[in-house]
Image: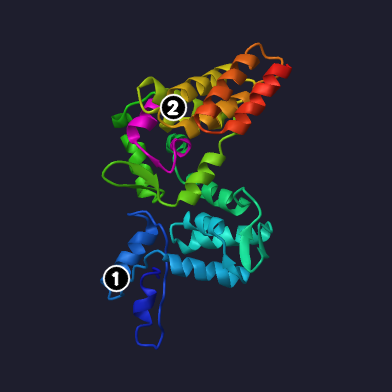
Amino acid sequence: MCSSDLPGQLAQYPVAWVLTRSGTRPGSSTDLLFTALERDGASRVTLGPLDDAAVTGVLTGTFGAAPEDRLLALAAGAAGNPAVLTELIGGLRDEAAVQVTAGQARLVSAGLPARITRLAQQRLGGLSARAQHLLKTAAVLGGTFRLADVAEMLGDTPAGLLPLVEETLAAGIVVADDAAFSFRHPLLGRAVGELIPGPARSALHRQFGEILLHRGDPAAAAAGHLLEAATAADRASLASLDSAAAELLPSAPQTAARLARRALQLTPPDDPGALARSVAAAEVLTAAGQLEPAARLVRQALAQ
């Protein structure tokens, strides 16, 4: 007997059937089953995402206290999906990543729970290797990304990537609006990015930051990627921070100060360019109104 025949066979009995599904691809066996049941008289009810009040209520009930803003922001990455939210909460409890202090449930860990990482791996597992590659690259670009940017990162064309994009859309991992694509659940998008080994992730951030700078995009757009990419062992990435800080100084001095300070922090004391970078950082900090840190850099440079 086909599974779709059973409700019909038992229709004369006082039995209520409730079947649920989540994220099933069109044309799959589950999709065909639900279509057949609906054709035979079943009612389909589509549940929307949990709203902010419901998410807050779930967090409060779980942890016994009102959630702080950071915890709420993390939970918002589930985009109201009960399954993703449940995995997040279960992971936070497994790892004791939330503590109640002063009447609030507070995050005490900056990382994602292992449960979310495993969920991201499961979602990717049903995709082709090339589609997984696309998603990991897109995750480095951010929660929202343009296909043209991903194509440039991968050395391909938007047309060449179209079948892969359609695959990710059909799987419900990515959604599209008029201008760009984004991960349906930002929390999983972040987890996908963290599946990339650290050195490779830094290299991808640097690649995209330099793409933005070379094509004339505002340096502010590249700043976050350059900061993620910078390492003490990579002089080219430090030079990119220097260039971006100088470009941003007239329009965004606070961002320029972050870049300059980070470049200096990653510069070894015995580096030949350490003194010049100290002077440059002091100038940027002064322009940004951060006079005390600037003076401290000057005193350190004079002492050396």
Give the dominant element type of the magenta stretch: helix, strand or loop.
helix
Instruction: Give the position of the N terminus as an image quadrant.
Output: bottom left
Residue annotated with mark 1:
38
Residue annotated with mark 2:
248
In this picture, residue 301 sits left or right of residue 138: right
Residue ID at (55%, 67%): 59
Q: Could one spot residue 265 in this view of the protein?
A: no
Q: Between 6 and 83, which is closer to the camera in this rendering?
A: 83
Looking at the image, tell me whether mark 1 or mark 2 is earlier in sequence order. Answer: 1
Q: Position of residue 298 (x, y in %)?
A: 65, 22
Residue flagged by tag 1: what amino acid is it? Answer: Glu
- The segment highlighted magenta reads 138-153
Badge 2 crowding class, 10 Å Cα cut-off, few under 14, some 14 to 19, many 20 or more, is many
**Colouring scheme, one of rainbow, by chain, secondary structure, one colour:** rainbow
Q: Between 4 and 62, which is closer to the camera in this rendering?
A: 62
Residue ID at (52%, 48%): 120
Q: Position of residue 247 (x, y in %)?
A: 43, 23
Residue flagged by tag 2: what amino acid is it? Answer: Leu
Residue 7 is inside the magenta segment? no
